[in-house]
Image (cartoon, coloured by chain):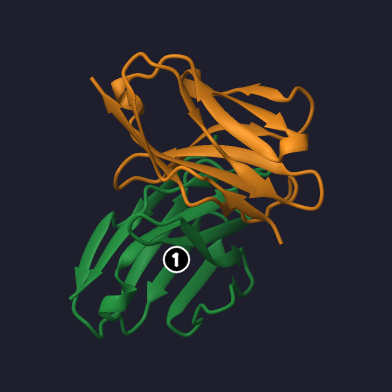
Chain colours: A green, B orange
């Protein structure tokens, strides 16, 4: 399967600052990538679908101005949490779509906003 | 809309015992079904998938799952559990083999007793 690298694995920031999370596909041309958010002891909630070279498609209820997604190349998608607040603290996971319907996940990034 | 139900939030089994994790899905057409495993603070690893054909699918780490259309189920099984199997297990459903997001169940946390 594809190898997906996500960075940073953990980040702590102050309220009001912005944080960028990178998701890299190391061995696969990632035309489509997904960003999920996972709350403690909860399932994964799809935030947005990111297509290379075009604007991301956000799920209902996800603020596109707060969660900026950029997918400028076939190997990199980034999620920027702007003006972060404590309620944005969560585990964010990216995934790339394989050729036969499965998803390959990054290691996840735990964001803590103080 | 598709949905996935994992009725068991938490299961504890003894090492060496057999395991079955339940998954029920709701989807109007032929579902594409997946099981993923997540270790604490990590991303998700694909255990197995079902697209068509033989309803009993084999996966990695000795896991298997059986698709039962009449019961809308895709239960995960392992004949003998190892301590290293302790993790969170997610069942997921997809619409097709295209590059689309998956819908996840709420997960089942597996604890293994020595």
User: Farthest right residue?
Assistant: B29
Foreground: A95 or B19? Answer: B19
Seen at 34% across and 19% down, the residue is B82
Which quadrant is the C terminus of chain B positioned in?
A: top left
Name the spot of residue A1 as percent of width and height, x first.
55, 34
Q: Secondary structure at mark 1?
A: strand
Label 1 marks a residue whose chain is: A
Label 1 belongs to which residue?
Answer: A78
Name the spot of residue A54 as percent of width and height, x first.
64, 72
Whether residue B71 sits left or right of residue A109 in the image: it is right
Name the spot of residue B76 as percent of width and height, x first.
55, 29
Q: Is residue B82 above or below residue B1?
A: above
Name the spot of residue A18 as percent of width and height, x first.
30, 79
Seen at 55% across and 42% down, the residue is B91
Seen at 45% across and 46% down, the residue is B107
Q: Determine the image quadrant of residue B65.
A: top right
Q: Is residue A84 above or below residue A49?
A: below
């Amino acid at each position: 399967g594809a190898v997906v690298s996500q960075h940073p694995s953990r980040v702590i920031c102050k309220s009001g600052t912005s944080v960028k999370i990178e998701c890299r596909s190391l061995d696969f041309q990632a035309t489509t990538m997904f960003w999920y958010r996972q709350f403690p002891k909860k399932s994964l909630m799809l935030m947005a679908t990111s297509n290379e070279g075009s604007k991301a498609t956000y799920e209902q209820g996800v603020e596109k101005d707060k969660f900026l997604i950029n997918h400028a190349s076939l190997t990199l998608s980034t999620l920027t949490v702007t003006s972060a607040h404590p309620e944005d603290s969560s585990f964010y996971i990216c995934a790339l779509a394989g050729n036969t319907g499965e998803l390959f996940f990054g290691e996840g990034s735990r964001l803590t906003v103080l | 809309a598709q949905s996935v139900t994992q009725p068991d939030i938490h299961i504890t089994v003894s090492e060496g015992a057999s395991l079955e994790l339940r998954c029920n899905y709701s989807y109007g057409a032929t579902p594409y079904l997946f099981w993923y495993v997540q270790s604490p603070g990590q991303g998700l690893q694909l255990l197995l998938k079902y697209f068509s054909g033989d309803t009993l699918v084999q996966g990695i780490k000795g896991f298997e799952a059986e698709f039962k259309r009449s019961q809308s189920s895709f239960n995960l099984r392992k004949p003998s559990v190892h301590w290293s199997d302790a993790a969170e297990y997610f069942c997921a459903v997809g619409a097709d083999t295209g590059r689309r997001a998956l819908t996840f169940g709420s997960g089942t946390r597996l604890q293994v007793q020595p």
